[in-house]
Image (tube, rainbow, N blue to C red):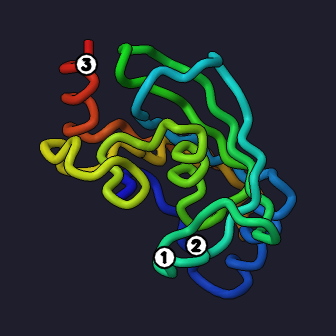
């Protein structure tokens, strides 16, 4: 249910080239989210390993022996019961932002897997958006960067919070 940009490799060589950038932490991935509650700090880092949930096999969780996962966050705006944040990924694990923010006690608004159930059903999606991606192109070797505007349901929710 994450909106925004998606990077797709056209062939195996491109995939390997992009995967190398991810492993070297040189690929830029920035997201915006609205999370429940009021984050204590204006910025921070969650460095916690992620793997399959030991009981709920369709979910991910912070688990000992999981794969390294690092998420940096910065508060953009506070609304009392919600906080608008920018997030930057160093790693790219499945559900990484959703798991990390939920581990802080601030799940993504509208997340029906890691967030509180039956709290926000009117959103039409979770408030997690892939805002910016930057990478070195596999063929031209030029740095390219793309951005995506927030979807309407996300901006509408921000306006309601304001």
| Res. 21 image quadrant | bottom right
Instruction: Mark 3: give few (<14), some (14-19) or many (20+) Cα within 10 Å.
Output: some
Q: How much space separates mark 1 and mark 3, taking CA atoms?
A: 33 Å
Q: What number is the disc on residue 53? A: 2
Mark count:
3
**Residues at discs 2 and 1 in contact (Cβ within 8 Å):** yes
- Furthest residue toward left: 122
Instruction: Mark 2: give few (<14), some (14-19) or many (20+) Cα within 10 Å.
Output: some
Lower position in the chain sequence, tag 1 or tag 3:
1
- Helix, strand or loop under label 2: loop
Report the mark closest to the observer, 1 or 3. 1
**Residue at image coords 49%, 36%:** 106
**In this orientation, which residue lies closer to the viewer: 35 or 55?**
55
Q: Taking 59 as reference, is 38 above or below it?
A: above
Could you tell me residue 95's position as x and y percent?
Answer: 53, 61
**Residue at image coords 80%, 51%:** 26
**Residue at image coords 49%, 71%:** 59
Report the residue marked by disc 3: 161
**In this orientation, which residue lies closer to the viewer: 99 or 86?**
99
Could you tell me residue 37's position as x and y percent?
Answer: 43, 26
Q: Taking 125 as reference, is 37 above or below it?
A: above
Could you tell me residue 8's position as x and y percent?
Answer: 54, 71
- Helix, strand or loop under label 3: helix
Q: Is residue 121 left or right of residue 17?
A: left
Report the residue marked by disc 1: 56
**Residue at image coords 39%, 55%:** 2
Q: How much space separates mark 3 and mark 2, taking CA atoms?
A: 33 Å
**In this orientation, which residue lies closer to the viewer: 121 or 87?**
121
- Furthest residue toward right: 24
Q: How much space separates mark 2 and mark 1, taking CA atoms?
A: 5 Å
Could you tell me residue 50's position as x and y percent?
Answer: 69, 64
């Amino acid at each position: 249910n994450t909106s925004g940009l998606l990077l797709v490799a056209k062939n195996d060589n491109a995939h390997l080239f992009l995967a190398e950038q991810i492993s070297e932490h040189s690929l830029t991935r920035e997201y915006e989210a609205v999370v429940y509650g009021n984050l204590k700090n204006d910025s921070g880092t969650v460095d916690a390993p992620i793997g399959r949930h030991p009981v709920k096999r369709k979910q991910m969780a912070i688990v000992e022996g999981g794969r390294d996962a690092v998420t940096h966050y910065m508060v953009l705006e506070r609304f009392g019961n919600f906080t608008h944040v920018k997030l930057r990924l160093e790693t790219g694990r499945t559900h990484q932002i959703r798991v990390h923010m939920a581990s802080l006690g601030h799940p993504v608004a509208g997340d029906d897997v890691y967030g509180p159930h039956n709290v926000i059903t009117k959103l039409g999606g979770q408030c997690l958006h892939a805002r910016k991606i930057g990478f070195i192109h596999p063929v031209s070797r030029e740095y390219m960067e793309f951005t995506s505007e927030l979807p309407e349901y996300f901006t509408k929710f921000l306006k309601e919070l304001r």
